Amino acid sequence: MNNGVFICHCALFSLFLQKELIRTVDLGPFKHTVDDGLELRKAAFECVDTLLDSCLDQVNPSSFIVPYLLSGLDDHYDVKMPCHLILSKLADKCPSAVLAVLDSLVDPLQKTINFRTKQDAVKQEVDRNEDMIRSALRTIASLNRIRYAKIFVRLISFLHDDP
């Protein structure tokens, strides 16, 4: 196995949330969950983004979108952001691969857009959430530009859904 193939396999394995890398830390009366795999997943998605930019002709985007990209769209903020970017790029460069799974992409994007921070959230949390919503909306705009996307009922109903 050459180095490039090995790196791809390691990156793809790292895209999923690994429960053994999540731990709970006691901070006095509070418990805090720490995800030691977050940086690894974030870096793996950034590697995938680079692979799609540099050698898209050697990657099968259809096999990447499900389940890897779907798991990233339901992950932490720092993982969702590169996933939105990757999905936007795939919508422009490989629209047929995205169309094949378009219905399954609506729910995680809708969940991101509808997420509201708590009333007592600090400004940084509110700003991050607004950034994530803008990113998801840019992704939806990319999906909507795909030629035959308008025939997908779930996307259309989501686009025309009144908040």
Image (cartoon, grey):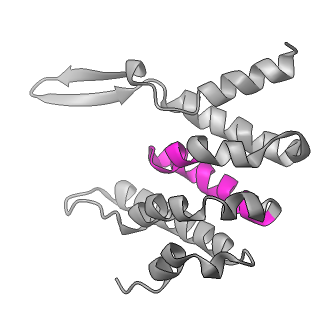
Look at the image and tell me in which quarter the N terminus lies: top right
Q: Residue furthest left?
A: 29
In the rendered image, residue 105, in percent from the top left (x then y), is placed at 54, 60
Q: Residue furthest top?
A: 1
In this view, the residue in front, 156 or 93, is: 156
In this view, the residue in front, 151 or 155, is: 151
Q: For residue 138, what is the image quadrant?
A: bottom right
In the rendered image, residue 35, in percent from the top left (x then y), is placed at 40, 28
Residue at image position (58%, 33%) is 15
Residue at image position (46%, 48%) is 77
Residue at image position (82%, 41%) is 59
Residue at image position (39%, 18%) is 20
Report the span colored magenta: 69-92
Tell me if 28 is positioned left or right of 141 in this view: left
Vertical placement of residue 28 versus 138, above or below: above
Q: For residue 148, what is the image quadrant?
A: bottom right
In the rendered image, residue 162, in percent from the top left (x then y), is placed at 37, 87
Vertical placement of residue 99 versus 59, above or below: below
Tell me if 70 is positioned left or right of 87 in this view: left
Is 6 covered by the magenta stretch? Answer: no
In the rendered image, residue 117, in percent from the top left (x then y), is placed at 29, 60
Look at the image and tell me in which quarter the C terminus lies: bottom left
Identify the main secondary structure in magenta: helix
Vertical placement of residue 59 versus 153, above or below: above
Is 79 covered by the magenta stretch? Answer: yes
